Image (tube, rainbow, N blue to C red):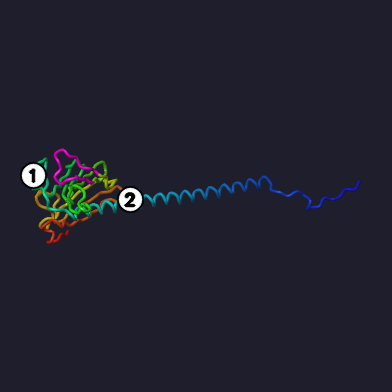
């Protein structure tokens, strides 16, 4: 019987089981690497967005502080319904604060055309509550006895809030002359993420501002 020899080209071609398994392993490794890179990019993007949000919060907070302190007016307000000569209140643990606190009257409260039934003077204050710097506002400088201020959270993750006051060429840690405005106020905020940040504000309503303030 005659047998026709098999041609090498007629043999079935394909991948062996070992080659298939090796290809699967390589594909899995590439997929894991790509996933790790993607996770890293997503984490970096999340951190970047959190940093931008935090910096925006800081900028808004210090811009608000600057507007309030640089527009302070020497305008006395009633205390507990009684007339007083108090222009500037600043004391620790007052206004239900867990650290420093301050209360004053500022000008420049926008009232277009005088349409709202209030003046452009606004009684404002600051306090620290539950690691948040809060801004306190009243509708009228001479609030009715028992009127609670509107507390607006201004800055989070604040562990300490302290103030110093410039008067007659020196810096004071306590303000014991509420009937007088300090020439300048230094605010120190201790933040959980950025440490201590200090800002200095000149009070234009003070009669001693023209003498200057320096450390």
- Report the span colored magenta: 135-151
- C-alpha distance separating marks 1 and 2: 42 Å
Q: Residues within 10 Å of mark 2 (few under 14, many from 20)?
A: some
36 left or right of 152 in image: right
Could one spot residue 186 in this view of the protein? no
Pick the quarter of the image with the C terminus: bottom left
159 left or right of 53 in image: left
What residue did someone put label 2 on? 54
Residue located farthest toward the top when viewing the structure as drawn: 146
Q: Nearer the viewer, residue 63 or 196?
A: 63
Residue 141 covered by magenta stretch: yes
What residue did someone put label 1 on? 83
x then y, percent, for residue 90: 15, 47
Q: Residue at x 26, y 41 (%)?
A: 130
Count of numbered labels shown in the rendering: 2
Could one spot residue 156 in this view of the protein? yes
At mark 2, the secondary structure is helix
x then y, percent, for residue 48: 39, 52
Q: Residues within 10 Å of mark 1 (few under 14, many from 20)?
A: few
Q: Nearer the viewer, residue 156 or 198?
A: 156
Q: Which mark is residue 101?
A: none
x then y, percent, for residue 56: 32, 52
- Between label 1 and label 2, give the one nearer the viewer: 1
Please identify the dominant SS of the magenta region.
loop
18 left or right of 33 in image: right
At mark 1, the secondary structure is loop
């Amino acid at each position: 019987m005659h047998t026709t020899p098999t041609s090498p080209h007629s043999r079935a071609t394909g991948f062996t089981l070992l080659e298939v398994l090796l290809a699967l392993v390589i594909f899995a490794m590439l997929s894991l690497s790509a996933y790790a890179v993607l996770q890293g990019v997503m984490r970096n993007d999340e951190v970047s967005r959190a940093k931008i949000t935090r910096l925006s919060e800081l900028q808004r907070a210090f811009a608000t502080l600057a507007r309030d302190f640089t527009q302070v007016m020497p305008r006395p307000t009633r205390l507990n319904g009684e007339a007083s000569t108090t222009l500037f209140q600043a004391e620790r643990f007052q206004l239900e604060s867990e650290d420093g606190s301050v209360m004053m009257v500022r000008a420049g409260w926008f009232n277009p055309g005088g349409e709202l039934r209030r003046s452009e003077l606004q009684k404002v204050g600051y306090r620290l509550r539950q690691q948040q710097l809060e801004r306190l506002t009243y509708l009228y400088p001479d609030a009715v006895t028992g009127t609670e201020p509107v507390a607006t959270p201004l800055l989070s993750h604040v562990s300490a809030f302290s103030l110093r006051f410039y008067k007659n060429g020196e810096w004071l840690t306590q303000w014991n002359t509420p009937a007088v405005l300090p020439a300048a106020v230094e605010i120190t905020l201790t933040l959980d993420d950025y440490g201590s940040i200090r800002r200095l504000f000149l009070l234009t309503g003070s009669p001693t501002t023209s003498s200057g303030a320096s450390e």
